[in-house]
C-alpha cells in the first residue's frame, strides 16, 4: 500500500467512512473528525509509519505538521519518513 | 430532612448480569467464583476469582466508546442503564440540573494501567493510545454515566479502598436527605481481575487459593471479584408523587476512621460505625434483623467484625442474622458495598436472607448466626450493610423495609 492508501484507510476508519469517500482535498472537519478523532489519527499514523509527528493538541496551528487536508498530511508523512532514513 | 428511598437497582457481577439474576443466585446460594482467564494468569499464584463471564464490549458499545471505556466503566454503564430504567426516571430540566452521580472505585481503570505499562515496559513501545488517561481515571465511570443519562448535578468519585461504594452511597444519601438533590445515581464498580491487579493482592498474602469461606474456622483468605452495582436514590415524596415502585428506604449511615493501622481492622472503629448508623437512622438495636457483613474471609476481618457486632448489639447479636455474600461473588473491592446492597434489598423487599456459602466449620470467634450455606425466609424490618476498608476507613448503611 502507498502512503496515500494507508493514510486514507486510517482517516476513513476514524471517520466511519469508506476509503472511497475520502478525497485528497477533504479536510478532517469535512469528514467529521473532531479533536479527539484527530489525536487518534495522529497516533495511528505514528504507529503505521514508525514516525513521531510534531503535533501539539494545544496549538495545532503552530505545529510543524500541516493537517489542513488529507493531501497535506500525506506530504508531511512522506517528509518525516524520508528524514528517518 | 427528606426521607430517601431506592427506586432502581442494577448490577453486573460474577453471579449475573442483572439485579434479578443476582437475587436468584443469592437465593440459591450459587457460587460465582472459579478459575480466572486473562493474559499471563499462569504466572500468578492465585488463579481464582469472581470473574464476570459472557460480557463482551463489542455489541454493547461502539468502537469509539470502547476506545474510551475501561472495563470498570463498561460494567458501570451496564448497571446504570438497568437501575435508571427500573426507576423510570428521565433526567431533563430542573431534575437533570440537580441530580448527579456519586460512585466508588478503589482502582479505576486498572487494566488500562496494566495493558499500557506492559506495552511500554515489557514490549518496549514508546507510544501509547491518546485516551489512556481519560480511560483509566477513577472518575471516568461517573463521568460517562453523567453524560449518558444527562445528570448535571453534584457528581464525583470516592475512593476509600473496600469501603468506596458505601462512602459514595452515603454521600448520595446525604444529598437527597438534605434536599440538595431530588435523585442521585450511586453505587460503585471495580475491575481489578487482570495480571497486575491480582499480582498486587498476592503480595499481601491474604488471598485464598481455594474459596472464600467467611466465618468458617477453616477460612484462609479473600477472593477477588469484579463488576458494578448502581442504584437510584430518590426523595420519598418525589418517588411517591410519580407512583414509582420503591425497593426499600435508606434510613441512615455512619462513617468512622480507626486511626490505628493501615491494614489491620479495629473492633472499636467498626463498632463506632455500626452504632453510629443505628443512631443516625433512629432505629433500635432490636429492630435490626439482618447485617450484610464485610465478611472478607480473612482471619482478621471476620473475628474483628463479629466482635464489633457482639459489642454493639449485646444479647440481640444472637438473634440477628449476619451473612457474607462475598462467598458467592467475591470481594469487589471498591464496588463491593454496592453489589452487597442487593442482599439487603432482597432481605427487606422479599424477606429472603442470602447465605454465607462455603461454610464448613464453626469458629468460636465468629459465634453468630451467619446463615450458613442456605438462604432463609424471614421478614426483615431493618438491615445494615458493613464496609471496613484498608486504611481503617469504615462506612455502614442502615436500610428499612417500606
Image: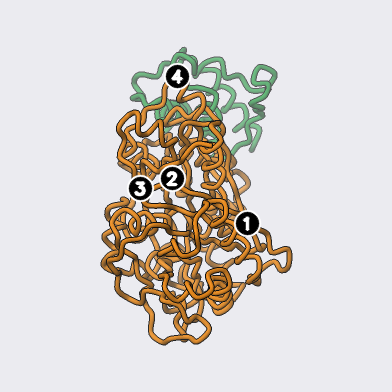
User: Depth-wise, is mark 4 or mark 2 nearer the camera?
Assistant: 4
| Residues at circles 3 and 2 in contact by the CB criterion of under 8 Å | no
Nearer-N-terminus badge (1/3): 1
Q: Tell me whether the residue at label 4 lies in contact with that at label 1, contact meaning CB atoms closer than 8 angstroms.
A: no
Badge 4 marks a residue whose secondary structure is helix
Q: Which label sits on residue B93?
A: 4
Q: Chain of mark 4?
A: B
Q: Is residue A45 above or below residue B280?
A: above
Which residue lies under the disc numbered 3? B402
Lower position in the chain sequence, tag 3 or tag 2: 2
Asked which secondary structure carries label 1, the reply is helix
Q: Taking the image as drawn, is residue B49 in sight?
A: no
Residue B396 vertical position relative to residue B211 in the rendered view, above or below: above
Q: Nearer the viewer, mark 4 or mark 1?
A: 4
Say which residue appears at 53% left-offset and 69% top-offset: B313
- Mark 1 — residue? B121
Mark closest to the chain's N terminus, 3 or 4: 4
**Would you call the spot at circle 4 few (<14 residues within 10 Å), some (14-19), or many (20 or more)?**
few
Colour assigned to chain A in the rendering is green
Of badges 3 and 2, nearer the viewer stands: 3
> How packed is label 2: few (under 14 Cα within 10 Å), some, or many (20 or more)?
many
Q: Position of residue B168 (x, y in %)?
A: 55, 47
Give the side of residue A81 with respect to residue B336, left or right.
Answer: right
Q: Position of residue A20 (x, y in %)?
A: 34, 21
> Given contact means CB atoms under 8 Å apart, are the residues at marks 1 and 3 in contact?
no
| First in sequence: mark 1 vs mark 2 | 2
Q: Is residue B243 left or right of residue B208?
A: left
Amino acid at each position: 500500500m502507498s502512503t496515500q492508501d494507508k493514510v486514507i484507510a486510517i482517516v476513513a476508519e476514524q471517520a466511519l467512512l469508506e476509503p472511497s469517500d475520502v478525497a485528497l482535498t477533504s479536510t478532517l472537519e469535512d469528514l467529521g473528525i473532531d479533536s479527539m478523532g484527530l489525536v487518534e489519527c495522529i497516533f495511528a499514523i505514528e504507529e503505521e509509519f514508525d514516525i513521531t509527528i510534531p503535533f501539539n493538541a494545544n496549538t495545532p496551528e503552530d505545529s510543524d505538521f500541516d493537517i489542513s487536508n488529507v493531501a497535506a498530511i500525506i506530504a508531511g508523512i512522506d517528509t518525516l519518513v524520508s528524514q528517518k532514513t | 430532612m427528606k426521607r430517601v428511598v431506592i427506586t432502581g437497582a442494577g448490577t453486573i457481577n460474577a453471579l449475573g448480569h442483572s439485579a434479578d439474576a443476582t437475587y436468584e443466585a443469592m437465593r440459591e446460594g450459587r457460587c460465582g467464583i472459579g478459575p480466572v482467564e486473562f493474559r499471563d494468569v499462569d504466572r500468578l499464584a492465585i488463579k481464582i476469582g469472581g470473574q464476570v463471564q459472557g460480557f463482551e464490549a463489542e455489541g454493547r458499545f461502539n468502537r469509539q466508546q470502547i476506545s474510551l471505556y475501561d472495563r470498570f466503566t463498561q460494567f458501570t454503564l451496564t448497571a446504570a442503564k438497568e437501575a435508571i430504567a427500573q426507576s423510570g426516571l428521565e433526567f431533563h430540566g430542573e431534575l437533570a440540573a440537580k441530580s448527579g452521580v456519586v460512585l466508588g472505585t478503589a482502582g479505576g481503570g486498572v487494566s488500562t494501567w496494566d495493558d499500557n505499562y506492559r506495552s511500554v515496559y515489557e514490549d518496549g513501545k514508546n507510544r501509547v493510545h491518546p485516551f489512556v488517561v481519560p480511560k483509566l481515571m477513577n472518575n471516568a465511570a461517573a463521568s460517562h454515566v453523567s453524560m449518558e443519562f444527562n445528570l448535571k448535578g453534584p457528581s464525583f468519585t470516592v475512593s476509600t479502598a473496600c469501603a468506596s461504594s458505601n462512602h459514595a452511597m452515603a454521600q448520595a444519601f446525604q444529598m437527597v436527605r438534605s434536599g440538595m438533590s431530588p435523585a442521585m445515581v450511586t453505587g460503585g464498580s471495580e475491575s481489578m481481575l487482570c495480571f497486575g491487579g491480582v499480582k498486587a493482592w498476592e503480595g499481601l498474602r491474604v488471598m485464598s487459593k481455594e474459596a472464600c469461606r467467611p466465618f468458617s474456622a477453616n477460612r484462609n483468605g479473600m477472593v477477588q471479584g469484579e463488576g458494578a452495582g448502581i442504584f437510584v436514590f430518590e426523595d420519598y415524596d418525589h418517588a411517591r408523587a410519580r407512583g414509582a415502585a420503591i425497593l426499600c428506604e435508606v434510613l441512615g449511615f455512619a462513617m468512622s476512621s480507626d486511626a490505628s493501622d493501615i491494614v489491620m481492622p479495629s473492633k472499636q472503629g467498626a463498632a463506632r460505625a455500626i452504632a453510629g448508623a443505628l443512631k443516625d437512622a433512629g432505629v433500635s438495636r432490636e429492630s435490626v434483623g439482618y447485617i450484610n457483613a464485610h465478611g472478607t474471609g480473612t482471619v482478621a476481618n471476620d473475628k474483628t467484625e463479629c466482635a464489633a457486632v457482639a459489642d454493639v448489639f449485646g444479647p440481640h447479636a444472637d438473634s440477628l442474622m449476619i451473612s457474607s455474600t462475598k462467598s458467592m461473588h467475591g470481594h469487589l473491592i471498591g464496588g463491593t458495598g454496592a453489589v452487597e446492597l442487593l442482599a439487603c434489598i432482597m432481605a427487606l423487599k422479599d424477606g429472603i436472607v442470602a447465605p454465607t456459602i462455603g461454610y464448613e466449620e464453626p469458629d468460636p470467634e465468629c459465634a453468630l448466626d451467619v446463615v450458613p450455606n442456605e438462604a432463609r425466609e424471614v421478614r426483615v424490618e431493618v438491615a445494615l450493610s458493613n464496609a471496613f476498608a484498608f486504611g481503617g476507613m469504615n462506612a455502614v448503611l442502615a436500610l428499612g423495609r417500606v
